[in-house]
Amino acid sequence: MPGPSPILSVGRPLAAGKARVEAVAETDVEWTRLIFAYLACATVWLIVGTLIGSYLSVKFVAPDIDHVSWLSFGRLRPVHTNTVFWGWTSLAMIALALYVVPKTSQRRLYSFPIAWTSLVLMNLAVIVGGALLMIGINNGGQEYREYVWPAMGLFAAGTVLTAYNLIRTIADRGIEEIYISNWYIVAGFLWTIALVTIAYVPFYQGNAISETVIQGYYMHNAVGMWFTPVVLGLTYYFLPKLLNKPIYSYSLGVLAFWTQMVFYTMIGAHHFVFAPTPWWLQTVAIIFSVGMLVTLAAGTGNFLLTMKGSGRTIARSYSLPFILAGVISYFLWSAQGTLEALRSLNPVWHFTNYTVAHSHQTMYGFVVFLVWGGIYGLLPRMTGREPSHLLAGIHFWFALIGYLIYTTALMIGGTLQGLSWIRGQAFIASVTLLVPYWLWRAVGGGMMFLSHLIFAYNLWRMRASRDEAALAARPSEALA
Ligand code: HEM
Ligand code: HEM
């Protein structure tokens, strides 16, 4: 009789046991409260936004599920996108930035009242903007700028105040150099303030062509010059910190930064390839979309080389797997974006569900995974409370498998949809063709949503102790 297989042996654990983090090291209770408040609000918006996203994905397979005007697809879709953009991802990134900037500047945050005011303004923007969208009041059909200007104005005011707060903290820094994280974070804020202004000032958008050019510029820079630089800046802090070793190359970080600043800002017009916008503008956008491969190689190469040789540390951590998945997604799905921009491939994918796959691969697989990695890396070290290791693992796998099912289904379905149109088949043929892929998207989306509920519970488990006396007065006491 052969003995038990060494691979399937009963005693072998399914996953590497996770290491516990150190006890409380932060004693600044005010700081911990502020950051937790941002993260708690962000998580509420994650649940609200993705509950709506899940409902929208059900509507694709059960279109008659309701006939209520304010629950119609056209109204709920922008509520989903704007809630996850401005409510969840932005607030979560700002929470982490409010930690990373003072930490790397070796200074306390410049102003707590300003930070609380920004939080109130940004929450108000999402509440007012979302409620108005649901009752049918919007800024026209332009994506990610559907909030009417007073609502977006609240968000912009919060962004300006946060930028001021962070820049003042960096200006008062206790060390000479400005750490690379802060380059990315400040750039993200400055670009976004300019971008929202350009997108909302109406007088040069009087006709459809100029409005389209501005829309391409705004839409791509919203994802590329807000979420991308801020989350990359945060990763330049969290990755070396959690691995306990320096970043592989500072110079590669600087190369990735400047190419991002130059190339990314030129590529907005690739959203409207073959549109009646100037041909040269589209060509410039396509060339710089290819140029982005340099940025991607420098950025992801730097992160992966930093992780090289740390496989065991990553396996034993519950935050680093999120960062690894986020970094890989960044490379894969942005490079896929380069392909989408080419004149040979764009006709197959443009207008199809393939773009929706790309949106979630990048915004979710890249940005949101890195945000989660940062939150799991930071909060236990601030509050001294860990999530359940098992539940953090379930969150990771449900989110990862869910988003892979969602996006793989739409990549295949979207390609078939485009080919069906190119063959000149009746439009309805492409609709019936997509039904099974939409069903898989709803299944994947359901798993993603479940993972968000688990994350919300984990966040609650990581909250600061209510009993301030229980917090140590000095780090030495906490670590004793
Ligand atoms: C090298 C980098 C990238 C390139 C070249 C690229 C390229 C593209 C292209 C060509 C489209 C338009 C597809 C079409 O409508 O035909 C697109 C759409 C989109 N991309 Fe990217 N992408 C890149 C990275 C990213 C990143 C990092 C994010 C998110 C952080 C992102 C988010 C989006 C979103 C949300 C859309 C959909 C916009 C819409 O609603 O129409 N992309 N991308
Ligand atoms: C449970 C998770 C989620 C589900 C089920 C979901 C579902 C959906 C659905 C059904 C749409 C409409 C697609 C269409 O018009 O054909 C959509 C659009 C979109 N969602 Fe989500 N979503 C989820 C999470 C997220 C998150 C967390 C983000 C960003 C952080 C996000 C960003 C977007 C974007 C950018 C679009 C516009 C796509 C485009 O026009 O290309 N979604 N989502």
Image (cartoon, rainbow, N blue to C red):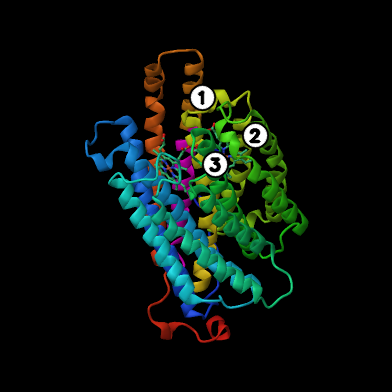
Q: Is residue 302 left or right of residue 221?
A: right
Few, some or many C-alpha atoms within 10 Å of disc 2 (few <14, some 14-19, many ≥20)? some
Q: Which residue type does callout 1 highlight?
A: Thr
- Can you tell which mark lies on residue 253? none
Q: Residue at x 55, y 71 (%)?
A: 165
Counting from the top left corner in percent of width and height, residue 126 is at 38, 56
Q: Residue at x 47, y 79 (%)?
A: 29
Quadrant in which the C terminus is drawn: bottom right
- Residues at circles 1 and 3 in contact by the CB criterion of under 8 Å: no
Going from N to C along the chain, the mark reached first, 1 or 3, is 3
Question: Closer to us: mark 2 or mark 1?
Answer: 2
Instruction: Kindly report the secondary structure that dominates the magenta region of the rendered protein.
Output: helix
Label 3 SS? helix
* Sequence order check, earlier mark of 2 and 3: 3
Q: Over which residues does the magenta segment extend?
A: 385-408
Q: Is mark 1 within 8 Å of ligand 1?
A: no
Residue bearing the label numbered 2 = 281
Q: Tell which quarter ligand 2 is in.
A: top left
What's the residue type where badge 2 is placed?
Answer: Leu
Q: Which residue is mark 1?
A: 415
**Cα distance between the residues tagged 1 and 3:** 28 Å
Closer-to-camera residue (93/13): 93
Residue 300 vs 431, above or below: the answer is below
Q: Quadrant of residue 182?
A: bottom right
Residue 93 shown left or right of residue 80 in the figure: right
Question: Local crowd at mark 3 within 10 Å, few (<14), some, or many (≥20)?
Answer: many
Which one is earlier in the sequence, the residue at label 2 or at label 1?
2
Residue 342 x %, y %: 64, 28
The residue that mark 3 highlights is: 214
